[in-house]
Amino acid sequence: MKLPRDIEDAIADFRELPRADDYVWDAGPSGIDSILEVVIEKYQIDKPRPERLIMENWNAIMGENALRCAPERIDSQGRLVVAVANPVLRRELAFSRKRIVAKIRRLEGCNDITDIEFRAG
């Protein structure tokens, strides 16, 4: 509970505590609009997520192999982990790793993708 400044000062004097130089009054509750703006900006909710962009463009990125593999996640090092149907396809895709990463990095918002990892799945 906030008290008026003169009462706060009297209590501080009585308890032999220093008086508050920077007395801040409670401005009251914030509106939901201002809270939403802060959350949207902090978590970048309004910006496209790389995961979504990759999924939307998966056929263009992978071409004829799009149905035989699927993106799983982006790890903490910025690598896209892709589940591949079989070892032969995994080896084939490993040869075109740089080309695939270049296609992904051309998508707006996917510049942080550094590499691609193919896993059996």
Image (spheres, helix red, strand yellow):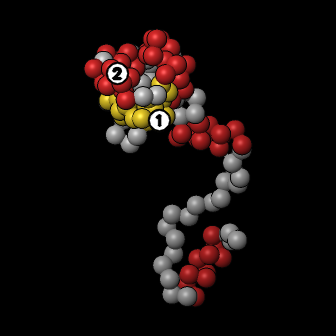
Which residue does the numbered mark 2 point to in the structure image?
A: 93
Residue 81 seen by the camera:
no
Neighbour tally class for label 2: few under 14, some 14-19, many 20 plus, Cα within 10 Å: many
Q: In the image, residue 113 lies at what x, y percent?
A: 37, 29
What residue sits 40% from the left and 40% below the top? 75
Instruction: Give above or below for 42 relative to 96.
Output: below
Packing grade of label 1 (10 A; few <14, some 14-19, many >=20) is: few
Q: Position of residue 72 (x, y in %)?
A: 49, 34
Q: Along the line of sight, which residue is nearer the eye, 121 or 27?
A: 121
Label 1's element? loop
Kind of element beneath mark 2: helix
Residue 47: % across, % down:
54, 27
| Number of callouts | 2
Q: Residue at x 65, y 39 (%)?
A: 36
Residue tagged by mark 1? 121
Vertical placement of 46 versus 95: above or below?
below
Closer to the camera in the image, 70 or 46:
70
Q: Amino acid at mark 2?
A: Leu
Q: Which mark is residue 27?
A: none
Q: Earlier in the sequence, mark 1 or mark 2?
A: 2
Above-or-below relation of 16 to 102: below
Q: Whole-Å distance between the Cαs marked 1 and 2?
A: 14 Å
